[in-house]
Image (tube, rainbow, N blue to C red):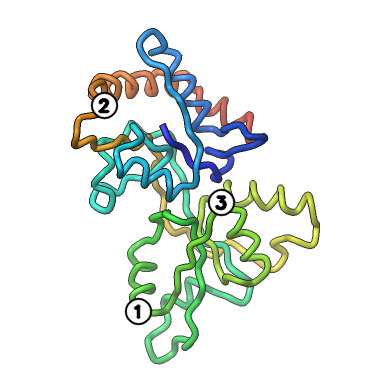
């Protein structure tokens, strides 16, 4: 399984080790299938991880939202790992919600620069329309940290991501330099609520003969550990 290497606290690399809420949850569920299967994680940038699945080199990717039409090379998706929110953090001078609602004759001529992590599909219908209308420009950057730094340094106007991940990275950055902060940045709107999953390779060439058996059994294992409140206990270890 390939995993996002820069999405704390869900899936990220720290001291050359892949960690995160989803990694721990999947490892816990994997213990129930240990007699037959052993899971190996490979951490890499999200866009590259998707490409590895698309090329058929990886069995699965962690942790996509469901986009079956836009990523037809991923199917099926596991039972949900957890719910996530996507919100916009913007500079105080930018009211993204208001900007999107203004009539055409009152809109500012300059587009709002909106940062996202490379490869993420997190625009709702209204933001997708705004992109096509030229109201916003999407700036893809390598990681959450790269986006947070660009937001602080005003190289982008807004940043879309899960707020827990954004604040996790901000805390790390501020610990190293207190001048790097969100004092003039606020959370302006909720973009969407989605579920995160294990996304399996559609495997058109049938390279993974064990796929059907694994998917079915692993869903049962995930459901079992979640019934035991394992997710809440893992989250508490990362977010006191």
User: Dot 3: few (<14), some (14–19), or many (≥20) neighbours within 10 Å?
Assistant: some
- Please identify the quarter of the rendering in which residue 95 is found: bottom right
Kindly report which numbered mark, 3 or 2, lies closer to the viewer in this rendering.
Answer: 2
Instruction: Estimate the x, y position of residue 198 in percent, counting from the top left.
Output: 37, 34
- The structure residue drawn at horizontal position 61% and vertical position 30%, both measured from the top left corner, is 236
Kindly report which numbered mark, 2 or 1, lies closer to the viewer in this rendering.
Answer: 2
Alpha-carbon distance for marks 3 and 1?
A: 27 Å
Looking at the image, is 237 positioned above or below residue 185?
Answer: above
- Identify the element where label 3 is drawn: helix
Instruction: Estimate the x, y position of residue 149 in percent, counting from the top left.
Output: 65, 61
- Identify the element where label 1 is drawn: helix
Q: Which residue is mark 1?
A: 133
Q: Counting residues from the N terminus, which is met first, the one under dot 3 or under dot 1?
A: 1
Q: Which residue is mark 2?
A: 208
- The structure residue drawn at horizontal position 33% and vertical position 72%, both measured from the top left corner, is 129
- The structure residue drawn at horizontal position 29% and vertical position 25%, both measured from the top left corner, is 215
Q: Which mark is residue 163?
A: 3
Instruction: Estimate the x, y position of residue 38 in percent, counting from the top left.
Output: 42, 17
Instruction: Estimate the x, y position of residue 230 in percent, counting from the top left.
Output: 51, 22
Q: Counting residues from the N terminus, which is met first, the one under dot 2 or under dot 1?
A: 1
């Amino acid at each position: 399984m390939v995993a996002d290497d820069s999405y704390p606290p869900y899936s990220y690399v720290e001291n050359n080790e892949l960690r995160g809420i989803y990694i721990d949850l999947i490892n816990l569920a994997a213990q129930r299938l240990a007699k037959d299967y052993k899971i190996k994680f490979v951490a890499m940038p999200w866009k590259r991880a998707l490409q590895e699945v698309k090329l058929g080199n990886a069995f699965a990717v962690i942790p996509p939202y469901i986009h079956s039409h836009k990523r037809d090379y991923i199917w099926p998706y596991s039972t949900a790992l957890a719910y996530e929110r996507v919100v916009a953090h913007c500079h105080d001078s930018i009211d993204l919600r208001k900007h999107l609602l203004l009539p055409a004759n009152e809109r500012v001529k300059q587009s709002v620069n909106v940062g996202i992590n490379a490869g993420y599909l997190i625009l709702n219908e209204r933001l997708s329309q705004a992109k096509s209308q030229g109201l916003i420009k999407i700036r893809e950057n390598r990681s959450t940290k790269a986006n947070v730094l660009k937001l602080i340094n005003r190289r982008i106007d807004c940043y879309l991501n899960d707020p827990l991940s954004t604040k996790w990275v901000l805390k790390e950055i501020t610990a190293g330099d207190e001048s790097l902060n969100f004092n003039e940045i606020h959370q302006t709107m909720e973009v969407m609520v989605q579920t995160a999953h294990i996304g399996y390779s559609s495997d058109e060439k049938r390279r993974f003969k064990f796929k059907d058996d694994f998917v079915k059994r692993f869903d049962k294992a995930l459901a079992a550990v979640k019934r035991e409140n394992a997710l809440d206990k893992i989250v508490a270890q990362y977010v006191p």
